[in-house]
Structures are given as C-alpha cells and as structure tokens.
Image: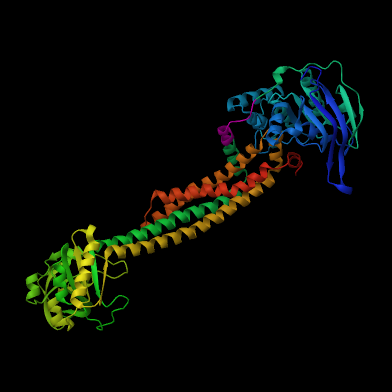
Amino acid sequence: MTPSSPLLKLEQVQRIYGSGETAVHALDGVSIEVHAGEFVAIVGQSGSGKSTLMNILGCLDRPTGGSYEVRGQDVSALDADELAALRRQTFGFIFQRYNLLASLSASENVEIPAVYAGLNLEERREKSAELLGRLGLGERLGHTPGQLSGGQQQRVAVARALVNDAEVILADEPTGALDSGSSAELLNLLEDLHASGRTIILITHDAKVAERADRMIELRDGRVVSDSGRASAAKAPDEAYRYSRKGPSPIVQVLESVKMAFRSLRANLFRTALTLLGVIIGVAAVVAMLAIGQGSQQEVMARFESMGANLLFVRPGAPGTRMRGDAIATLTLQDVEALGELDNVLAAVPSRSSSATLRVGSNDYRSSVEGTSQDWPIAQKRGLKYGTFFTADDMDRRVGAVVLGTTTAGNLFDDIESAVGQYVFLGGAPFEVAGILEERGASSWGQDQDDVALVPITTGMMRLFGQNYLSSITIAVDDTDIVDETQAEATSLLLARHGTEDFQLRNTATILESVQETQNSFSILLGSVASISLLVGGIGVMNIMLVSVSERTREIGVRMATGARRSDILIQFVVEALVVGGLGGVAGVLIGFAVCFILAQSGMTIAVTTLPAVLAFTSALVTGLVFGLLPARKASRLDPVAALSSE
C-alpha cells in the first residue's frame, strides 16, 4: 500500500436484509475512503445505516454488493478465520454497551484480544495493567464490571480495544450511555489516541460529539449524503501499531478454555451440580456394577475351581435325559474299577447319595448321606479337621464307619473334636465316627457342603441304599493338558462295557466355560444398565451446553469481534464439555469405589480393578466430547453481528 492509498475503501457497498418486497436496504451504494491516521465521525439518525456500516468496516459483516478493501485486500475473498485474523490485527472495538464479560475482572476483559493474538500470560497481564493504569484504573484491575461505574466500564472497553495495538479504533455510540463528564473524558481519550497516530472511526447520532472529529460523513437511508472530506493535517500512522501475531498455540487455546470452563461452571453452581450429577451417577453405576459382576464371577469360578479343575464327571442316563429317582441304573462299582485303571487317572471315585436321619442318644438330625470310596479326598481336594478317612480295607470289609461334616457333627455332638471314635445310629445300625471334614461352607448354588455324612460305598449299598448302582462317578486326572484325551478314553471304555451310550461324561473345564460365559453375560448386562445412566448424563451435558451457548451468545460475539477464530470458540466449548465430563468422571469413580467399599464391608464379594474405573472415566470424557460437539459447533458458527446484538 502506497502512502496515498486508502487504509479502508468501500465502493458501491450494499447491505440488503431479506428479499423481494420485504427487502431492507440498510446500505445502498456507499462509497468511502478512509486513510491511515484520520479521525472520522459517521453521523445519522437511527436507521440510517451507521451500525451496519461499522459492522462492515470492522469485518463483522459482509456486504451484499459492492467491494470493501482493507490495505488493498478485498475482504470478500477471506474466509471466517482470515476475517478473524484481520479483526485481531487491525481493529479495536469500543461498543456502546461496553460488552464486558461479567464473570471476568477488568484486567481479564482487557486481555481477551491478546489471548487470541497469542501473547503469553505474562505479556497479557503486563500490557493490561499498563493500559488500565494509563486510563486511571490501576487500582481496579481485579474488579468485575458490576463493581465499576459506566465511565470506568467504558475505559475498560477502550483498553481492550488497544491491547493488540489496533491501528483502527471503531467506536459505536461510545458516549450514548455516559454522563456528560464521562463523555468528555472519553472524547478526550479518543483525541489523544488519534494524536498518537491511530485511525479513529466514531459512529454517533450526536452532532456535538461528531464535531470533535476532523472529518464528518453523514448517512441517511443507507446513503452518504455529505462528506466533509479528508483533513490535510492527518498524522501518519506509527508503524509500531502494526501487529502481526498469528493467533494462539493449541496449548494456549486449551489452557484458556479450561480456565473459562471452570469460571463458567462456578458462575452457575446449582446448574453445574445437577449436570454433574447425571455423569456422576452413570460413572459410579458403571464402576460399582462391574465390580459386583466381576466379584460374583470370581466367587462362582473360585467355588467351581475348588472342586478341582482336573475332574471328569460321569452321570447315568443317555445324553439329553434326566435321572429320576431310581429309574436309571447304568453305573456300577465295576465301572469305577475299570476307569481307575486308565492312564492319566489318579482316582475314580464312586458316589451314591440319599438323605437319612442320624441319631446320637436323644439327638436326631437329618442330613445328606453319601457313599463313596477312600479316594474321595483326592478328587474333592478336601482334608480332615479331626480323625482319619476310611480306608480301602474298610471298603472291602464293609465297615460301619462314617466321616461327618462340621454342620452335621455340630448338630449331633456338643464338642465335634470329641466326636471322633463315638458312634451314631444311621439306618438303624451303629457307625463309628472316623473323622470330621474340614469346613468348606456353602456351594455356588447355596448348598451347605458341611452338612454331609460319608460312608464306604460298599457299606452304604448293603445297609442304607438297598441298590447296587451309582449316582455318579468322579474321575481325577493327573495331567490336565491331556484331559480331553482321557475323557475320550473313558467314553470309549464305558461304551465298550455298556454296549450303548447310557451315560453322560463332562469335564470341569466345560462346566467352568459355561459358567464363565453366563457370568460374562451377567456382567455385560450390568454394565449395559449402568451405561444407560451414563448416556442420560451425557444428554444432560448436551442440554446444559446448549443452554450455555444461548446464555453466552453475546460473549461469543465479543470474542469473535476481538479476534477469536471459529476454532477458538469450538475448542472453548468442547473443552468446557470435557471438563464437565472429566469432573463427573472423577467424582463418579470415587463414589463408585466408596459404594464398592461399603458393599464389601457388608460381606458381598466385590472385585475392584482399575480397568472398569479407567473405562468409566474415559466413557465420561467421551460422553462429554460427543454431547458437547453439537453445542460447540453451534457456538462456533454464530454470526458475530447477530451474537453481539442478542440480549
């Protein structure tokens, strides 16, 4: 641009709102040139097009027709972010209604354009303090707009316009809301700025205010009706006011957005609490329910594994049939002997069960009675608390010996340790108590595993059961790596002995796999139910962010006018949503852990691991991001002029 070239040039600019018969020509063929260092007053009555012209001059709005050039560059070729950069580097706005952000201090309001210009925190604070000090507000840096008078607020707005060393100051009715004394101070300040080389464009309807300018342009019905012309004594601009920062770094963007997020949340604590509550409940539910599901799974699996992961179970009856009473009699002691001779078999243990009444003196107690062999402790991995187990010799001689569980023994004897060697009557015959089993507790299906009486299977068949067939056979294998091969051999052996498949054979691994699949499904169900709570919380985040965008529309307009790019606004609101999700996630995880602790203290099996907590927290962040994108996108695409004029 040559020294004689205009800084701002409008040629046949039109701005039309609406279309057809309802079209309004706010500007109708306006042609103006403004040179650097001028002090121009644009006057006219309300509706003459002054504010529309200022919006176009400040690159807040685009003309419908004609051309507008800044330093010889046609602004119609610039996109939204390039226009933001132009506003940031060239223009400073002084609005009639100040447009200060109520939640920020005077110093922080002044710093807003510098944030988007990329100044670091120290530079911003130093420059803000310097400007406010020069304007007589050195002792008011930390005061919010509500703590300042109208004149003081206007001076803060002036400092904000100057913080980026703007070359052009656009003042829209700056004295409209001020008393005469404050108006005079502001006009003196504008004259001082003009004297320092800045270009001043003053929008006013007051002729006396306009007389303070060197040049007066009058608008009427969107057209220039008079122009006093360029003053000959306009001072050349000081190149120091040319500012070429390219905007904040991504890190600065995020840090500033986080600060604004906490400030926004603090400004509406009750609403923030309600929003966080939805996320907190969702995250806490995910953590607690998955811990409950995993705890239940671990408990069930542990109890099944306590039976032995090296076991094969043989049941009577063909596959697909159920044993009913004494209707199926396919397994015998001879099958047990044959199975016990297979390779990789530690023991084949027979079993025949029923219930019977045991008597000691005048004490009667009905318990489960199981006939088995001396290898039962091997298969069940269960030792004795007192005494010994019956032996193979006891089996052969059909000795009347019994091994009691602690529940059964406790109901028959006052001192279970002294029960060893005493006699109980079972099926009308005396049985000597050989030993007391160690305690095992309830099974996974709730059965008391200590409520049992074990007798030699041979004795039981002769004295108690009246039948010579078995309820089941348990096979303990040596090497679990080849358990499938052992199962196949046992199946072949029984088929050869019986001539038909009148039995069912399964291994523990198959049972454990089925149980684990069931428990996994249960955990997924619990997690899904909890995730619904998190989804509801996410919808709450989106609603509150949409409300926030609506409430802060003017703030968005101010930020855009002072140089914020669309990406700056987008990042700000996305980060705010992430902060909500993050705070809710942290609180939810802590509450979820607290719930797990309380449930664990009550006796419930809880498995607290870091993975569900990490997943829940991550889900909260993702929920905040996903549900915050729509409001953030809406905020970033607001029209600056419409945003500034919103109530």
- State the count of labels: 0
350 or 597, nearer to the observer: 350
- Residue 158 location in percent, x, y? 73, 28
Residue 442, compared with residue 27, is above or below; it is below
For the C terminus, which image quadrant? top right
Q: Is residue 212 above or below residue 575?
A: above
Whether residue 329 is visible here, answered yes or no, is yes
> Is 479 displayed left or right of 44 in the figure?
left
* 581 or 182, nearer to the observer: 581
Lateral position of residue 579 relative to residue 89, left or right: left
Q: Position of residue 580 (x, y in %)?
A: 56, 46
Along the viewing direction, whichever of 518 and 581 lies nearer the viewer: 518
Q: Which residues are magenta?
A: 245-255
Based on the displayed image, in which of its 4 quarters is residue 382 positioned?
A: bottom left
In front: 343, or 213?
343
Q: Quadrant of residue 383?
A: bottom left
The quadrant of the rendering that contains the N terminus is top right
User: Is residue 91 rendered magenta in the image?
Assistant: no
Q: Position of residue 462 (x, y in %)?
A: 13, 82
